[in-house]
Image (cartoon, grey):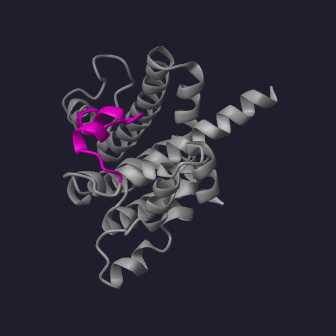
Amino acid sequence: MTDLIREFRRQLAIQRWDDHRYYHQSRINQTLHLISALSFLVAYGLLFIDPAAAALVGWLVSMTTRQAGHFFFEPLGFDHVNQATNEHKEAIKVGYNLRRKVVLLSAWVLLPALLWVDRSLLGLIEPSTGFAGWVHDVGLLWLALGVGGLLFRTLHLFVLKSPLEGLVWMTKILTDPFHDVYLYHKAPLALLRGERLDPMTHVRQVMAAQAAPKSDDDGEAAVELQR
């Protein structure tokens, strides 16, 4: 059991480390992730009070800021920090890469339109009355979409990789808001100083250590980075 917990923590550290170094080099993206993380924490609190409102905050604020950072501000060319092409980074991404995100976001946009045309959603739900009722139902549908997207990719990883890796990824996604606040709380100040890209000095140092004859383990390096 102890070995399983140790392996879980090691894989979680690696997934967080790779996610940070590969996909969060833009200071604008980091700042948007900070905004996203803070609003996600608000949404987490709202889940216990008004789940529909929580989903509206999560999708309209948290997800839009987060995905805007990835689609519009994160460099998509050759990654000189990690010596990797964007195609390679997209291929090895554990979670939703840009192609998968397009599918997920398309469903996000389509659901409100379908509900506007048919308030009963083909007889699956009780039809709402008025605009407020429609908004409430949209929130619940978006909540179902978010939960469904999380569970689908988790189960997909169960098959593609292993149950442990799927559970690690799900844990990472659910705890990302807390971890992103820790990682990117200084990003707005760096952006105000005119720093458009994170120099990723810490990443270069770890990669240099790994390239040395006596290299550190990826997981141990990632854990040290997060301390």
Reply yes or no: does residue 19 show up in magenta. Answer: no
Q: Is residue 224 above or below residue 217?
A: below
Residue 122 percent across, percent down from the top left:
27, 17
At 42% from the left and 58% from the top, the residue drawn is 36
| Furthest residue in direction bottom, as rendered | 193
Quadrant of the snapshot with the C terminus: bottom right
Residue 59 or 180: which is nearer the viewer? 180
Residue 3 or 129: which is nearer the viewer? 3
| Furthest residue in direction right, as rendered | 2
| 18 sits left or right of 99 in the view | right
Reply yes or no: does residue 83 show up in magenta. Answer: yes
Q: Is residue 199 above or below residue 23?
A: below
Residue 77 percent across, percent down from the top left:
19, 52
Quadrant assignment, res 111: top left
Residue 182 or 115: which is nearer the viewer? 182
| Residue 219 appears in the figure | yes
Residue 129 percent across, percent down from the top left:
33, 37
| 22 sits left or right of 117 in the view | right
Quadrant assignment, res 9: top right
Q: Which residues are magenta?
A: 82-102
Q: Is residue 189 above or below residue 17?
A: below
Residue 174 percent across, percent down from the top left:
55, 42
| Furthest residue in direction front, as rendered | 213
At 63% from the left and 51% from the top, the residue drawn is 223
Quadrant assignment, res 112: top left
| 3 sits left or right of 171 in the view | right
Q: How many marks?
A: 0
| Residue 104 appears in the figure | no
At 44% from the left and 17% from the top, the residue drawn is 160
Residue 83 or 32: which is nearer the viewer? 83
